[in-house]
């Protein structure tokens, strides 16, 4: 809160500086205030970079031109192969780098689809009320009663054969997450509907759609941004669990969960196969959670210090 | 209170009804052909054998008819028979469900034993080194994939202590409680550890909220010892919302048991589920989904009822 200390002059001086200086200053403040959140943000940015162009991070590849050396199988970490090699002599570090794309696509895909659904239907349900609300909430009840992973396995196993594995995972996870998120959105929408500024907007002749888009949805963005970061982590964790059980992304697409499943055959001889992919899943989920916590403190000061 | 419970039970009917429909449709749409699998096992692939098998499994009827039959069966508390073993689903589950329940109860206990004290310490010593350590631990526990911890423990134990890859022979708790607990402790600890992260975070929040209340200040100004204020005044009230999070971690434990039973080769419902879904054993898949959904639904109800019971200010009308 450095700007507050300098009073209004400080704020004006800050505002008059060029954009790049301002964003550099606010980044610096974020890093100082939320060191763990900043570490999380840094790792998240690295992951996105890996997902976009993995070849920048490793000379090896895991795709068609795999550099396989059978003589170099199951070797432990070394200067040439940082995380060792697997049972086919493939570089574990490279496979992890290439696996980032799968996790990032599914993590961000789930968040975008689930939050879009939750905001649309939660707002409609809370704002419109009546029969639509009644029926829609019974559908949400089903989504909340669904027994988590048990049902997701069934849904992914069913849908993957029809619409492809990545899309099946995104769709089934999104629908389940949207069910519980839409409850929260509905609650917020209900309470905003009773605010005076909504009455005022109505008195001025605003349409339902305008009230929803101008007054309700903007109030939901802070909640959505905060939960989005944590939800990416949840989605990455569930995807890796599914892949570990063999229901996730199918080969040849590299996936961290699947690497752990493959490691089971060799793990006593080569524990590095079991350690590194899991460590990366852990760091990914941890980073998204830390970032989410810091964003919540920053965007929603009422919750600061709690949780 | 009674009215509230009755209303909640009534609302459960459409939910469970919708859920059975969803599960039933999903199972029918799974790609693959169970009849071809079974017929193939007998080396018989003629159309006659196929038709006979379809008739035997009542798969020759259309889907709505199959669904109504299944609902009728459930109404008679009959979950059908496994297509693979031919035994009733009840008898298949009767040996496996208790194993999963034991794992779940142990995990729940561990999550509370670990989560509560650390959460309380974190709140009482807010912003101290202990608080930061506790909070980081909680997020760490929530972020660590449970199957990974399981694998790494097995790999390291195998490499450095020359332990075998998990128990190939399972010992029931009624046969030999000591060796059973030896088998179950590590998987239960992994499962409970993950859930304890949530308990820690929630306990800390609840405790912080209570510590800011006026009556805590009053208690302190009366000159009560800090320990008395914490245990008598704060903890009692902070524990109310914690009951909820313990209940809400039950679905996570049900899902987690599928994974941990696979990693540790525990013959419970979760591992059976994975096997059944791979082999397209429809009645078993349906039944396990139904049983887990019932656990989730009743856990949610129990949470709400306990909450209103413990906190008289919130009575549902």
Image: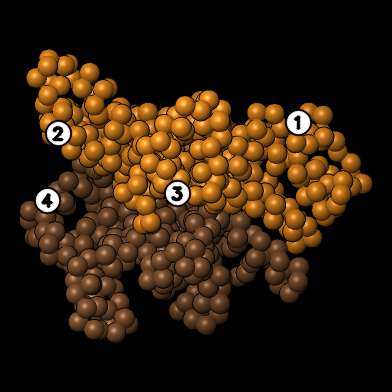
Chain colours: A orange, B brown
Above or below residue A270? Residue B19 is above
Disc 4 element: helix
Which residue does the image show at 17% across and 46% down from the upper left? B11
Q: CA distance from mark 1 to mark 3?
A: 32 Å
Sequence-wise first label, 1 or 2? 1
Sequence-wise first label, 3 or 2? 2
Please name which of the two marks, 1 or 3, marks the residue nearer to the observer.
Answer: 3
**Which percent across, then down, holds residue B173?**
47, 77
Q: Is residue B146 visible?
A: yes
Task: Give B130 or A46, whichever is nearer the viewer.
Answer: B130
Give yes or no for contact between labels 4 and 1 (Cβ–Cβ under 8 Å): no
| Label 3 crowd (10 A; few <14 / some 14-19 / many >=20) | many
Q: Which residue is mark 1?
A: A55
Q: Which residue is mark 2?
A: A195
Q: On the same chain: label 1 and label 3? A: yes
Q: CA distance from mark 4 to mark 1?
A: 59 Å
In the image, is B161 to the left or to the right of B109? right
Task: Give A173 or A44, whichever is nearer the viewer.
Answer: A44
**Which percent across, then down, holds residue B21?**
30, 37
Q: How many marks?
A: 4
Give yes or no for contact between labels 4 and 2 (Cβ–Cβ under 8 Å): no
Q: On the same chain: label 3 and label 2? A: yes
Q: CA distance from mark 4 to mark 2?
A: 30 Å
Task: Give B4 or A190, whichever is nearer the viewer.
Answer: A190
Say which mark, if any, is on residue B7: 4
Please report, as a chain letter, where disc 2 is located.
Answer: A
Please report, as a chain letter, where disc 1 is located.
Answer: A
Residue A91 image-quadrant placement: top right
Say which mark, if any, is on residue B264: none
């Amino acid at each position: 809160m450095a700007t507050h200390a300098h009073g209004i002059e400080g704020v004006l001086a800050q505002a008059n500086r060029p954009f790049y200086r301002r964003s550099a200053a606010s980044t610096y403040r974020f890093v100082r205030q939320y060191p763990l959140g900043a570490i999380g943000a840094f790792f998240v940015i690295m992951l996105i970079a890996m997902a976009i162009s993995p070849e920048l991070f490793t000379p090896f590849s895991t795709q068609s031109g795999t550099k396989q050396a059978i003589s170099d199988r199951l070797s432990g970490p070394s200067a040439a192969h940082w995380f060792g090699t697997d049972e086919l002599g493939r570089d574990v570090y490279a496979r992890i780098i290439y696996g980032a794309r799968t996790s990032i696509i599914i993590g961000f895909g789930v968040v975008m689809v689930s939050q879009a659904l939750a905001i649309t239907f939660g707002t409609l349900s809370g704002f419109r009320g009546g029969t639509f609300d009644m029926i829609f909430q019974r559908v949400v009840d089903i989504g909340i009663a669904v027994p988590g992973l048990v049902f997701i396995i069934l849904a992914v196993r069913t849908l993957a054969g029809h619409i492809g594995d990545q899309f099946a995972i995104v769709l089934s996870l999104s629908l389940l997450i949207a069910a519980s998120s839409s409850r929260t959105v509905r609650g917020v929408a209900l309470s905003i509907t009773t605010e005076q500024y909504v009455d005022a907007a109505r008195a001025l002749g605003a349409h339902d759609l305008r009230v929803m888009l101008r007054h309700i949805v903007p109030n939901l963005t802070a909640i959505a941004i905060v939960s989005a970061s944590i939800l990416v982590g949840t989605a990455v964790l569930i995807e890796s669990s599914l892949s570990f059980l063999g229901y996730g992304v199918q080969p040849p697409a590299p996936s961290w969960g699947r690497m752990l499943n493959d490691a089971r055959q060799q793990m006593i001889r080569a524990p590095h196969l079991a350690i590194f992919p899991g460590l990366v899943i852990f760091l990914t989920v941890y980073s998204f959670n830390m970032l989410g916590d810091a964003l919540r403190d920053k965007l929603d000061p009422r919750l600061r210090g709690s949780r | 209170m009674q009215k509230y419970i009755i209303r909640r039970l009534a609302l459960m009917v459409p939910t469970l009804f919708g859920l059975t429909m969803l599960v039933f449709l999903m199972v029918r749409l799974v790609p693959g052909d169970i009849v071809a699998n079974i017929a193939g096992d007998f080396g018989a692939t003629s159309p006659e054998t196929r038709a006979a098998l379809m008739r035997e499994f009542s798969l020759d009827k259309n889907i709505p008819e199959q669904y109504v039959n299944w609902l009728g069966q459930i109404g008679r508390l009959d979950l059908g028979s496994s297509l693979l073993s031919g035994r009733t689903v009840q008898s298949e589950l009767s040996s496996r469900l208790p194993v999963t329940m034991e794992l779940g109860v142990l995990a729940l206990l561990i999550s509370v034993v670990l989560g509560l004290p650390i959460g309380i310490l974190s709140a009482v010593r807010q912003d101290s080194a202990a608080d930061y350590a506790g909070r980081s631990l909680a997020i760490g526990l929530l972020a660590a994939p449970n199957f990974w911890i399981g694998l790494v423990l097995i790999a390291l134990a195998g490499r450095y202590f020359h332990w075998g890859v998990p128990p190939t022979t399972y010992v029931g708790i009624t046969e030999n409680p000591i060796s059973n607990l030896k088998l179950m402790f590590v998987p239960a600890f992994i499962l409970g550890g993950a859930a304890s992260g949530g308990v820690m975070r929630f306990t800390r929040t609840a405790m912080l909220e209570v510590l800011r209340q006026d009556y805590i200040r009053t208690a302190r100004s009366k000159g009560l010892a800090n320990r008395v204020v914490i245990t008598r005044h704060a903890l009692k009230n902070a524990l109310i919302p914690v009951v909820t999070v313990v209940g809400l971690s039950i679905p996570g434990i049900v899902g987690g048991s599928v994974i941990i039973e696979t990693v540790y080769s525990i013959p419970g419902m979760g591992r059976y589920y994975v096997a059944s879904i791979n082999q397209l054993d429809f009645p078993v898949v349906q039944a396990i989904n139904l049983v887990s959904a019932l656990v989730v639904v009743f856990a949610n109800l129990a949470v709400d009822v306990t909450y209103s019971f413990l906190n008289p200010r919130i009575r549902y009308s």
